[in-house]
Image (tube, rainbow, N blue to C red):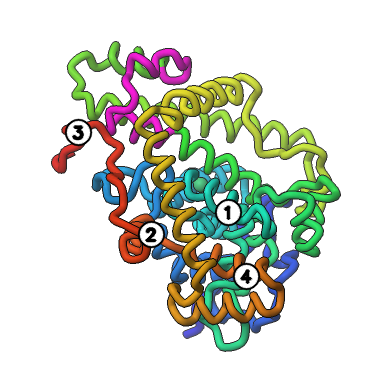
Protein backbone atom coordinates (compact mmCIF):
# COMPACT_ATOMS: atom_id res chain seq x y z
CA UNK A 1 0.00 0.00 0.00
CA UNK A 2 1.48 3.37 -0.89
CA UNK A 3 2.44 5.50 2.09
CA UNK A 4 0.72 8.84 2.23
CA UNK A 5 3.22 11.63 1.59
CA UNK A 6 3.23 14.70 3.79
CA UNK A 7 3.52 17.92 1.84
CA UNK A 8 6.86 19.40 2.90
CA UNK A 9 5.38 22.92 2.75
CA UNK A 10 2.51 22.16 5.08
CA UNK A 11 2.10 24.61 7.93
CA UNK A 12 4.56 27.12 6.49
CA UNK A 13 3.80 30.82 6.42
CA UNK A 14 4.19 32.65 3.07
CA UNK A 15 7.37 34.35 4.39
CA UNK A 16 9.07 31.04 5.22
CA UNK A 17 11.74 29.38 3.08
CA UNK A 18 9.63 27.10 0.91
CA UNK A 19 11.48 24.24 -0.62
CA UNK A 20 9.73 24.82 -3.91
CA UNK A 21 11.37 28.28 -4.07
CA UNK A 22 14.85 27.06 -3.11
CA UNK A 23 17.76 28.29 -5.20
CA UNK A 24 19.02 24.74 -5.12
CA UNK A 25 22.39 23.05 -4.78
CA UNK A 26 25.66 23.91 -6.48
CA UNK A 27 25.71 20.45 -8.05
CA UNK A 28 22.17 19.43 -8.99
CA UNK A 29 21.03 16.14 -7.49
CA UNK A 30 17.86 14.12 -8.01
CA UNK A 31 15.16 14.50 -5.35
CA UNK A 32 15.09 11.96 -2.54
CA UNK A 33 12.03 9.66 -2.43
CA UNK A 34 11.04 10.49 1.15
CA UNK A 35 13.21 13.30 2.51
CA UNK A 36 12.90 16.98 1.72
CA UNK A 37 15.92 19.01 0.60
CA UNK A 38 16.45 20.91 3.87
CA UNK A 39 15.99 17.67 5.76
CA UNK A 40 18.79 16.17 3.66
CA UNK A 41 20.98 19.17 4.47
CA UNK A 42 20.43 18.66 8.18
CA UNK A 43 21.13 14.94 7.88
CA UNK A 44 24.36 15.55 5.94
CA UNK A 45 25.53 17.97 8.61
CA UNK A 46 24.84 15.48 11.41
CA UNK A 47 26.77 12.78 9.54
CA UNK A 48 29.74 15.05 8.81
CA UNK A 49 33.15 14.59 10.43
CA UNK A 50 33.31 18.24 11.47
CA UNK A 51 30.05 17.84 13.40
CA UNK A 52 31.44 14.93 15.42
CA UNK A 53 34.49 17.00 16.32
CA UNK A 54 32.28 19.65 17.97
CA UNK A 55 32.00 17.40 21.00
CA UNK A 56 35.65 18.08 21.81
CA UNK A 57 35.61 21.82 21.16
CA UNK A 58 34.65 24.58 23.56
CA UNK A 59 33.73 28.24 23.56
CA UNK A 60 34.94 29.60 26.88
CA UNK A 61 36.03 26.58 28.87
CA UNK A 62 38.57 24.01 27.84
CA UNK A 63 37.15 20.68 26.84
CA UNK A 64 38.59 18.39 29.49
CA UNK A 65 37.70 20.62 32.43
CA UNK A 66 34.50 19.05 33.57
CA UNK A 67 31.79 16.78 32.28
CA UNK A 68 29.01 19.32 32.63
CA UNK A 69 30.22 22.33 30.70
CA UNK A 70 28.83 23.08 27.28
CA UNK A 71 30.81 21.95 24.32
CA UNK A 72 30.26 23.27 20.82
CA UNK A 73 28.12 20.24 20.18
CA UNK A 74 25.74 20.75 23.09
CA UNK A 75 25.75 24.48 22.33
CA UNK A 76 24.69 23.76 18.73
CA UNK A 77 21.89 21.48 19.97
CA UNK A 78 20.68 24.18 22.37
CA UNK A 79 20.70 26.76 19.57
CA UNK A 80 18.68 24.38 17.39
CA UNK A 81 16.20 23.71 20.19
CA UNK A 82 15.54 27.41 20.81
CA UNK A 83 15.29 28.19 17.10
CA UNK A 84 12.91 25.31 16.36
CA UNK A 85 10.55 26.46 19.11
CA UNK A 86 10.38 29.93 17.57
CA UNK A 87 10.22 28.62 14.00
CA UNK A 88 7.20 26.50 14.76
CA UNK A 89 5.34 29.47 16.22
CA UNK A 90 6.17 31.77 13.31
CA UNK A 91 5.42 29.25 10.57
CA UNK A 92 9.06 29.09 9.49
CA UNK A 93 10.85 26.11 8.01
CA UNK A 94 11.92 24.00 10.96
CA UNK A 95 14.22 21.70 8.98
CA UNK A 96 16.08 24.61 7.44
CA UNK A 97 16.54 26.46 10.70
CA UNK A 98 17.76 23.28 12.37
CA UNK A 99 20.27 22.64 9.59
CA UNK A 100 21.65 26.18 9.92
CA UNK A 101 21.91 25.96 13.72
CA UNK A 102 23.67 22.59 13.68
CA UNK A 103 26.18 23.84 11.12
CA UNK A 104 26.77 27.36 12.43
CA UNK A 105 29.88 26.54 14.48
CA UNK A 106 31.50 23.88 12.27
CA UNK A 107 34.35 26.23 11.34
CA UNK A 108 35.39 27.07 14.87
CA UNK A 109 39.00 26.60 15.89
CA UNK A 110 40.12 24.78 19.03
CA UNK A 111 39.96 26.83 22.27
CA UNK A 112 37.02 29.01 21.26
CA UNK A 113 37.46 32.73 20.73
CA UNK A 114 41.09 32.65 21.80
CA UNK A 115 41.95 30.15 19.07
CA UNK A 116 39.99 32.09 16.46
CA UNK A 117 41.76 35.37 17.27
CA UNK A 118 45.18 33.72 17.27
CA UNK A 119 44.58 31.99 13.94
CA UNK A 120 43.26 35.21 12.44
CA UNK A 121 46.44 36.99 13.57
CA UNK A 122 48.61 34.24 12.02
CA UNK A 123 46.62 34.49 8.78
CA UNK A 124 46.71 38.30 8.64
CA UNK A 125 49.31 38.42 5.82
CA UNK A 126 47.53 35.60 3.94
CA UNK A 127 43.91 36.76 3.70
CA UNK A 128 42.81 36.38 7.35
CA UNK A 129 40.66 33.80 9.09
CA UNK A 130 36.94 34.21 9.85
CA UNK A 131 35.19 31.36 11.63
CA UNK A 132 31.93 32.03 9.81
CA UNK A 133 33.58 31.77 6.47
CA UNK A 134 35.38 28.68 7.70
CA UNK A 135 32.04 27.02 8.58
CA UNK A 136 31.02 27.59 4.98
CA UNK A 137 34.38 26.25 3.80
CA UNK A 138 33.83 23.09 5.82
CA UNK A 139 30.48 22.35 4.18
CA UNK A 140 31.52 23.57 0.72
CA UNK A 141 35.07 22.22 0.40
CA UNK A 142 36.63 20.42 3.33
CA UNK A 143 34.25 17.55 4.01
CA UNK A 144 35.30 14.71 1.75
CA UNK A 145 32.46 12.23 1.62
CA UNK A 146 30.85 12.10 -1.80
CA UNK A 147 31.97 10.64 -5.09
CA UNK A 148 30.51 13.40 -7.25
CA UNK A 149 31.61 16.59 -5.46
CA UNK A 150 33.66 18.07 -2.65
CA UNK A 151 31.90 19.22 0.48
CA UNK A 152 28.32 18.40 1.42
CA UNK A 153 26.65 20.17 -1.52
CA UNK A 154 24.07 21.90 0.69
CA UNK A 155 21.25 24.09 -0.60
CA UNK A 156 21.73 27.81 -1.11
CA UNK A 157 19.44 28.60 1.84
CA UNK A 158 21.44 26.55 4.35
CA UNK A 159 24.71 28.06 3.09
CA UNK A 160 23.20 31.56 3.23
CA UNK A 161 22.29 30.96 6.88
CA UNK A 162 25.74 29.64 7.81
CA UNK A 163 27.41 32.77 6.44
CA UNK A 164 26.25 35.11 9.17
CA UNK A 165 28.86 37.84 8.71
CA UNK A 166 31.35 38.43 6.01
CA UNK A 167 33.78 41.23 5.16
CA UNK A 168 33.10 43.12 1.92
CA UNK A 169 36.40 41.86 0.57
CA UNK A 170 35.39 38.24 1.07
CA UNK A 171 31.82 38.90 -0.07
CA UNK A 172 33.11 39.93 -3.49
CA UNK A 173 34.74 36.54 -3.90
CA UNK A 174 31.67 34.56 -2.88
CA UNK A 175 29.44 35.21 -5.89
CA UNK A 176 25.74 34.72 -5.31
CA UNK A 177 26.22 34.06 -1.61
CA UNK A 178 28.17 37.28 -1.02
CA UNK A 179 25.70 39.55 -2.81
CA UNK A 180 23.57 40.37 0.18
CA UNK A 181 26.52 41.81 2.10
CA UNK A 182 27.33 44.13 -0.80
CA UNK A 183 23.71 45.08 -1.48
CA UNK A 184 22.72 45.17 2.20
CA UNK A 185 19.83 42.75 1.83
CA UNK A 186 18.56 40.36 4.48
CA UNK A 187 18.91 36.59 4.56
CA UNK A 188 15.91 34.27 5.08
CA UNK A 189 13.97 34.55 8.34
CA UNK A 190 15.34 31.13 9.26
CA UNK A 191 18.89 32.53 9.02
CA UNK A 192 17.92 35.61 11.06
CA UNK A 193 16.41 33.35 13.69
CA UNK A 194 19.44 31.04 13.91
CA UNK A 195 21.59 34.09 14.54
CA UNK A 196 19.52 35.32 17.50
CA UNK A 197 19.00 31.81 18.90
CA UNK A 198 22.81 31.51 18.99
CA UNK A 199 23.04 34.69 21.07
CA UNK A 200 20.30 33.61 23.45
CA UNK A 201 21.92 30.20 23.91
CA UNK A 202 25.45 31.38 24.61
CA UNK A 203 24.59 34.32 26.86
CA UNK A 204 22.47 32.11 29.05
CA UNK A 205 24.65 29.05 29.15
CA UNK A 206 27.74 31.13 29.86
CA UNK A 207 25.92 32.39 32.96
CA UNK A 208 25.22 28.79 33.92
CA UNK A 209 28.76 27.54 33.21
CA UNK A 210 30.34 30.65 34.75
CA UNK A 211 28.43 30.09 38.00
CA UNK A 212 29.29 26.38 38.08
CA UNK A 213 32.96 27.10 37.49
CA UNK A 214 33.05 29.62 40.33
CA UNK A 215 34.10 32.42 37.98
CA UNK A 216 30.86 34.34 38.61
CA UNK A 217 28.62 34.66 41.66
CA UNK A 218 24.90 35.32 41.98
CA UNK A 219 25.71 38.56 43.82
CA UNK A 220 27.77 39.87 40.93
CA UNK A 221 25.11 38.84 38.43
CA UNK A 222 22.47 40.72 40.40
CA UNK A 223 23.89 43.83 38.73
CA UNK A 224 22.10 42.58 35.58
CA UNK A 225 18.37 43.33 35.67
CA UNK A 226 17.37 40.31 33.62
CA UNK A 227 19.15 38.05 36.12
CA UNK A 228 18.22 39.89 39.30
CA UNK A 229 14.48 39.83 38.64
CA UNK A 230 14.50 36.07 38.08
CA UNK A 231 16.78 35.52 41.03
CA UNK A 232 14.45 37.39 43.37
CA UNK A 233 11.35 35.72 41.98
CA UNK A 234 12.75 32.20 42.41
CA UNK A 235 13.99 32.93 45.95
CA UNK A 236 10.61 34.36 46.88
CA UNK A 237 8.69 31.39 45.51
CA UNK A 238 11.11 28.70 46.79
CA UNK A 239 13.20 29.91 49.75
CA UNK A 240 14.55 26.38 50.40
CA UNK A 241 15.72 25.72 46.87
CA UNK A 242 19.16 24.10 46.32
CA UNK A 243 21.79 26.20 44.60
CA UNK A 244 21.87 23.87 41.61
CA UNK A 245 18.11 24.14 41.07
CA UNK A 246 18.22 27.89 41.75
CA UNK A 247 20.70 28.45 38.94
CA UNK A 248 18.69 26.29 36.58
CA UNK A 249 15.42 28.04 37.44
CA UNK A 250 17.00 31.46 36.83
CA UNK A 251 18.58 30.51 33.52
CA UNK A 252 15.43 28.78 32.32
CA UNK A 253 13.37 31.85 33.27
CA UNK A 254 15.74 34.17 31.42
CA UNK A 255 15.66 32.04 28.27
CA UNK A 256 11.89 31.84 28.43
CA UNK A 257 11.56 35.61 28.79
CA UNK A 258 13.75 36.48 25.81
CA UNK A 259 12.35 33.73 23.58
CA UNK A 260 8.77 34.79 24.33
CA UNK A 261 9.66 38.38 23.53
CA UNK A 262 11.40 37.27 20.32
CA UNK A 263 8.25 35.46 19.18
CA UNK A 264 5.92 38.35 20.05
CA UNK A 265 8.10 41.08 18.53
CA UNK A 266 8.83 39.12 15.38
CA UNK A 267 5.16 38.26 14.96
CA UNK A 268 4.29 41.95 15.18
CA UNK A 269 7.05 42.91 12.73
CA UNK A 270 5.92 40.23 10.28
CA UNK A 271 2.31 41.31 10.50
CA UNK A 272 3.27 44.88 9.78
CA UNK A 273 5.68 44.24 6.90
CA UNK A 274 3.76 41.20 5.68
CA UNK A 275 6.37 39.92 3.21
CA UNK A 276 4.63 37.82 0.58
CA UNK A 277 7.53 35.41 0.09
CA UNK A 278 11.21 34.84 0.86
CA UNK A 279 12.34 37.33 -1.81
CA UNK A 280 10.24 40.03 -0.12
CA UNK A 281 11.98 39.10 3.16
CA UNK A 282 15.37 39.53 1.48
CA UNK A 283 14.44 43.00 0.21
CA UNK A 284 13.62 44.33 3.71
CA UNK A 285 15.89 47.03 5.13
CA UNK A 286 15.92 45.51 8.61
CA UNK A 287 15.71 41.96 9.94
CA UNK A 288 12.12 41.03 10.84
CA UNK A 289 13.17 38.48 13.45
CA UNK A 290 13.90 40.76 16.35
CA UNK A 291 13.54 41.48 20.06
CA UNK A 292 11.51 44.40 21.38
CA UNK A 293 13.65 47.41 22.17
CA UNK A 294 13.29 46.75 25.92
CA UNK A 295 14.37 43.11 25.75
CA UNK A 296 17.16 43.88 23.29
CA UNK A 297 18.49 46.35 25.88
CA UNK A 298 18.18 43.91 28.79
CA UNK A 299 19.86 41.16 26.80
CA UNK A 300 22.63 43.52 25.70
CA UNK A 301 23.37 44.36 29.32
CA UNK A 302 23.76 40.68 30.13
CA UNK A 303 26.16 40.35 27.22
CA UNK A 304 28.15 43.39 28.34
CA UNK A 305 28.37 41.95 31.85
CA UNK A 306 29.73 38.65 30.51
CA UNK A 307 32.26 40.49 28.38
CA UNK A 308 33.57 42.34 31.38
CA UNK A 309 33.26 39.75 34.13
CA UNK A 310 33.56 36.34 32.48
CA UNK A 311 35.46 36.63 29.20
CA UNK A 312 37.92 39.03 30.82
CA UNK A 313 38.12 37.19 34.11
CA UNK A 314 41.79 36.81 35.00
CA UNK A 315 41.63 33.02 34.88
CA UNK A 316 39.93 33.11 31.49
CA UNK A 317 42.49 35.61 30.21
CA UNK A 318 45.33 33.39 31.34
CA UNK A 319 43.83 30.46 29.40
CA UNK A 320 43.23 32.74 26.44
CA UNK A 321 46.88 33.64 26.39
CA UNK A 322 48.00 30.02 26.66
CA UNK A 323 45.57 28.87 24.00
CA UNK A 324 46.74 31.61 21.65
CA UNK A 325 50.34 30.52 22.24
CA UNK A 326 49.52 26.92 21.34
CA UNK A 327 47.63 27.80 18.14
CA UNK A 328 50.32 30.24 17.03
CA UNK A 329 53.15 27.79 17.67
CA UNK A 330 51.38 25.00 15.77
CA UNK A 331 50.61 27.27 12.81
CA UNK A 332 54.24 28.35 12.62
CA UNK A 333 55.54 24.81 12.95
CA UNK A 334 53.40 23.51 10.06
CA UNK A 335 54.24 26.53 7.91
CA UNK A 336 57.95 25.77 8.39
CA UNK A 337 57.49 22.05 7.86
CA UNK A 338 54.25 20.94 6.16
CA UNK A 339 55.36 17.32 6.58
CA UNK A 340 54.67 17.65 10.31
CA UNK A 341 51.00 17.40 9.25
CA UNK A 342 49.35 14.15 8.09
CA UNK A 343 50.15 13.28 4.48
CA UNK A 344 46.90 14.53 2.92
CA UNK A 345 47.24 17.96 4.54
CA UNK A 346 50.95 18.19 3.80
CA UNK A 347 50.24 17.43 0.15
CA UNK A 348 47.60 20.13 0.02
CA UNK A 349 49.97 22.66 1.57
CA UNK A 350 52.60 21.82 -1.04
CA UNK A 351 50.12 21.84 -3.98
CA UNK A 352 48.45 25.09 -2.94
CA UNK A 353 51.85 26.55 -2.09
CA UNK A 354 53.00 25.80 -5.60
CA UNK A 355 49.89 27.41 -7.10
CA UNK A 356 49.61 30.47 -4.84
CA UNK A 357 52.85 30.74 -2.82
CA UNK A 358 52.75 31.29 0.94
CA UNK A 359 49.11 32.30 0.76
CA UNK A 360 48.12 28.86 -0.50
CA UNK A 361 50.35 27.04 1.96
CA UNK A 362 48.98 29.13 4.84
CA UNK A 363 45.38 28.37 3.88
CA UNK A 364 46.04 24.63 3.95
CA UNK A 365 47.70 24.97 7.37
CA UNK A 366 44.82 27.11 8.69
CA UNK A 367 42.28 24.53 7.50
CA UNK A 368 44.19 21.84 9.37
CA UNK A 369 44.62 23.85 12.59
CA UNK A 370 41.01 25.10 12.55
CA UNK A 371 39.73 21.53 12.33
CA UNK A 372 41.54 20.45 15.50
CA UNK A 373 39.75 19.74 18.74
CA UNK A 374 41.10 21.21 21.98
CA UNK A 375 42.65 17.93 23.06
CA UNK A 376 44.16 17.19 19.67
CA UNK A 377 45.80 20.63 19.58
CA UNK A 378 47.28 19.94 23.02
CA UNK A 379 48.58 16.54 21.87
CA UNK A 380 50.12 18.03 18.74
CA UNK A 381 51.74 20.77 20.78
CA UNK A 382 53.20 18.12 23.08
CA UNK A 383 54.48 16.13 20.09
CA UNK A 384 55.97 19.02 18.13
CA UNK A 385 56.77 21.85 20.52
CA UNK A 386 56.85 21.20 24.26
CA UNK A 387 54.85 20.01 27.23
CA UNK A 388 51.69 22.17 27.10
CA UNK A 389 50.94 24.58 29.94
CA UNK A 390 48.26 23.83 32.53
CA UNK A 391 44.81 24.47 30.98
CA UNK A 392 42.49 24.37 33.99
CA UNK A 393 40.28 27.39 34.41
CA UNK A 394 37.66 26.48 36.98
CA UNK A 395 37.98 27.19 40.67
CA UNK A 396 38.80 23.86 42.33
CA UNK A 397 36.06 21.87 44.02
CA UNK A 398 33.14 23.79 42.55
CA UNK A 399 32.22 21.08 40.09
CA UNK A 400 31.63 17.53 41.19
CA UNK A 401 30.50 14.55 39.22
CA UNK A 402 27.24 14.17 41.10
CA UNK A 403 26.10 17.54 39.79
MG1 LIG B 1 27.44 29.64 18.31
Q: Residue placed at 56% from the left, 66% from the top?
A: 138
163 left or right of 247 in image: right
* First in sequence: mark 4 vs mark 1: 1
Q: CA distance from mark 4 to mark 1?
A: 23 Å
State which quadrant residue 171 falls in.
bottom right
* First in sequence: mark 2 vs mark 1: 1
**Which residue bears the numbered disc 3?**
396
Do the CB atoms of the residues marked 3 and 2 lie less than 8 Å apart? no
> How would you rate the neighbour count of disc 1 (Cα within 10 Å): few for under 14, some for 14-19, many for 20 or more?
many
Do the CB atoms of the residues marked 2 and 4 lie less than 8 Å apart? no
266 left or right of 181 in image: left
Q: CA distance from mark 2 to mark 4?
A: 24 Å
> How would you rate the neighbour count of disc 2 (Cα within 10 Å): few for under 14, some for 14-19, many for 20 or more?
many
- Asked which secondary structure carries label 2, the reply is helix
Task: Decide if residue 102 is in sight here.
Answer: yes
**Which residue bears the numbered disc 2?**
377
Bounds of the magenta segment:
204-227
**Which residue bears the numbered disc 4?**
140
**Which residue bears the numbered disc 1?**
122
139 left or right of 75 in image: right
Secondary structure character of the magenta stretch overall: helix
Q: Residue placed at 65% from the left, 83% from the top?
A: 30
Amino acid sequence: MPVQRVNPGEGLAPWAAWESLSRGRRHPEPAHPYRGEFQRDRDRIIHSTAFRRLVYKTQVFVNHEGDHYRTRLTHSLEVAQIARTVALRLGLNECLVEAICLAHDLGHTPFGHAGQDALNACMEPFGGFEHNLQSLRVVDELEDKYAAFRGLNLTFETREGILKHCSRRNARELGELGERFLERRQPSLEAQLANLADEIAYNNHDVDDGLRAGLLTEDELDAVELFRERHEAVRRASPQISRRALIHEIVRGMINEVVTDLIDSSEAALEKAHPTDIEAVRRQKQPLIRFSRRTAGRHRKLKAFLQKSLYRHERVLLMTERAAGIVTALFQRYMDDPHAMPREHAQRALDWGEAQGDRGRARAVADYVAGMTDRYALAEYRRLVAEPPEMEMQAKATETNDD
